[in-house]
Image (tube, rainbow, N blue to C red):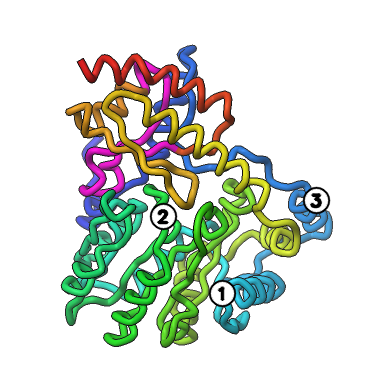
Amino acid sequence: MRPMNVAERMGRLGTESAFEVLARARALERQGKQVIHLEIGEPDFDTPEHIRDAAKRALDAGATHYGPSAGLPELREAIAKHITETRGVPVSLEQVVVTPGAKPIMFFTIMALAGHGDEVIYPNPGFPIYESVINFVGATAVPIPLRESSEFGFDLELLERSISSRTKLIVINSPANPTGGVLDRAQIDRVAALAAARNIPVLSDEIYRQFLYDGEFVSIYNRPGMAERTIILDGFSKSYAMTGWRLGYGVFPPPLVEHITRLMVNSASCTASFVQLAGVAALQGEQAGRMVAEFKRRRDILVDGLNKLPGVKCLRPRGAFYVFPNITGTRRSSAEVAERLLNEAGVAALSGAAFGAHGEGYLRFSYANSEANLRAALDSMRPVFESLAR
């Protein structure tokens, strides 16, 4: 076959390496190799029964047809109530757009606000889709390095110097993927003051809000002048163990809602109605407390174990369910170490460089796995790190 000529912009679109590594790990498993999965950011808990039951009832009641592109009114109302209660700022259902998963919120927001000649500031290392979509729409990605020396917080002086007349959006993520870092109140206040003074919108990725182990969660949404400039990205995948259900949402300043809704009309049309009704049940039921307590215990097991491995140094993250150990002591690239862990130890992890150039020298492990598997992974990895240290 002749090669197909694809649009130039496709060369600017990146990927999410977690799914690539997962596919490779699955291929090894099909060959009979045992693999411990610490690569994918997916809670290993089942979706709670009351949520599954709500979906079954919705299916039996015929909730299988098209719904409004912005989402069912009953879910948008439940989300508005939830945001009002948890962020401390009144929100109306008209500000909410429901999407199949939370990724469309970042895609649609960047697409609606940035284009050629514009700049978007984002955290690096950070969720790889930020940089991917910024590049895809033809804007310039302006990274703010997250450094281990500041517990992976924003470099606020660099942030201020990086803002220009071309800055159309600032992206923040707290608690953060991949580092588990958390922006404290003083950092959030500084970002808010800079954004408000220059009238720059902020996309606040709060998908890990409930996975906080130390300190307090602070949303930029309730800081002075920010309700009218903030887009909240959140969803159900993490907090309710609903990854496969594909249910996310954004809370937008009113002028943006029409544009985001049209992007839904032009892409996915709408989110599955029975899934949305399960989302109502999720918001009305028990929250993520049991998962958070278990993840905190697992975090400590993994951090303590990693710090006993040669060439590894690991901070204790304050949020999310990832650790981001420093492996510069191995004197090998992140990609090489991740490859050896998969092939020699049967442990699937991600190279820190998959999250941006400033992630080189680190690995990301998800501790959304059982205690037994975490301990087995630590045992399996030891010979690899010992050989790297020689």
Q: Is residue 263 magenta?
A: no
Q: Is residue 344 magenta?
A: yes
Q: Position of residue 142 (x, y in %)?
A: 21, 64
Q: Position of residue 44 (x, y in %)?
A: 60, 38
**Quadrant into which the N terminus falls:** top left
Q: Secondary structure at mark 3?
A: helix
**Region rendered in magenta:** 342-365
The disc label shown at residue 205, or none: none
Which residue corresponds to mark 1?
87
Q: Residue at x 73, y 56 (%)?
A: 286
Viewed as shown, does residue 7 lie left or right of 374?
Answer: left
Q: Earlier in the sequence, mark 1 or mark 2?
A: 1
Q: Name the kind of residue labelled 3 in the image.
A: Asp
Q: CA distance from mark 1 to mark 3?
A: 29 Å
Extreme residue in the top direction? 32
Q: Name the kind of residue labelled 2 in the image.
A: Ala
Q: Name the kind of residue labelled 1 in the image.
A: Arg
